[in-house]
Amino acid sequence: MTEDAKFEDGDDRPLKLIAADTEDLQVISALVQDAVLPASEMKYEPSKRRFVLLLNRFRWEDQSRAAQRRRAYERVRSILMFEDVAGVSSQGIQRDDPETVFSLLSIGWEAREDGVGQLVLTLAGDGAIALDVECVNVTLQDVTRPYVAPSGKAPEHPE
């Protein structure tokens, strides 16, 4: 008999998740919500058809456990990689200052009639990055041990 995985099953092990459809993408989007990154940690590699971000991700999967145990909230450095990328465009963001810090709010999918689509990374402050892709092919991988969130708080969103 098999059981569904639970957050507790992950403990402090690093995440490595792959999204191959929009349902998988929703999971990754939830896990990277409120991740922060400097402009210098975004890279488009046209020859490899890849767009990569190095994020400081809030560990949403650990939030309730941290609150129950009254211990510090955590972040972890993660790579968010998009494959099969044909083009990248942005709106409302300035990438010329490498010290500019972005906050990722969500990743969405916009299908087109021809079977391809666009992944839209929505950033705080009305910024967005659009990736023209052939399919959903996204990887999220933690690359460091968790560390105490500098703010000491969980991100909040008005309802």
Image (cartoon, rainbow, N blue to C red):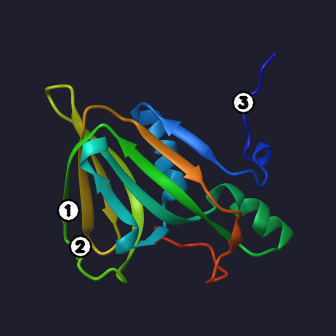
Q: Which of the numbered marks, if any, corresponds to residue 141? A: none
Is residue 49 shown above or below 21? below
Asked if the residue at tag 3 contacts the one at tag 1, i.e. Cβ–Cβ closer than 8 Å, the answer is no
Q: Which of the numbered marks, if any, corresponds to residue 93? A: 2
What residue is disc 1 on? Answer: 90
Q: State the residue lying farthest toward the front.
A: 47
Is residue 21 shown above or below 105? above
Q: Is residue 49 visible?
A: no
Q: Secondary structure at mark 2?
A: loop
- Locate residue 18 relative to residue 90 in the image: left or right: right
Cα distance in 3D space between marks 2 and 1: 7 Å
Q: How many marks?
A: 3
The amino acid type of the residue labelled 3 equals: Asp
Residue depicted at x 67% and y 54%:
61
Looking at the image, tell me whether mark 1 or mark 3 is earlier in sequence order: 3
Badge 1 crowding class, 10 Å Cα cut-off, few under 14, some 14 to 19, many 20 or more, is some
Is residue 74 shown above or below 85? below
The amino acid type of the residue labelled 2 equals: Ile
The picture quadrant where one finds residue 84 is top left
Q: In the image, residue 31 lies at what x, y percent? A: 55, 54
Q: In the image, residue 67 lies at what x, y percent? A: 76, 68
Q: Is residue 92 visible?
A: yes
Residue depicted at x 48% and y 43%:
139
The amino acid type of the residue labelled 1 equals: Ser
Q: In the image, residue 91 lies at what x, y percent? A: 18, 65
Asked if the residue at tag 1 contacts the one at tag 2, i.e. Cβ–Cβ closer than 8 Å, the answer is yes
Residue depicted at x 64% and y 61%:
59
Q: In the image, residue 78 lies at what x, y percent? A: 55, 58
Cα distance in 3D space between marks 1 and 3: 38 Å
Looking at the image, tell me whether mark 2 or mark 3 is earlier in sequence order: 3
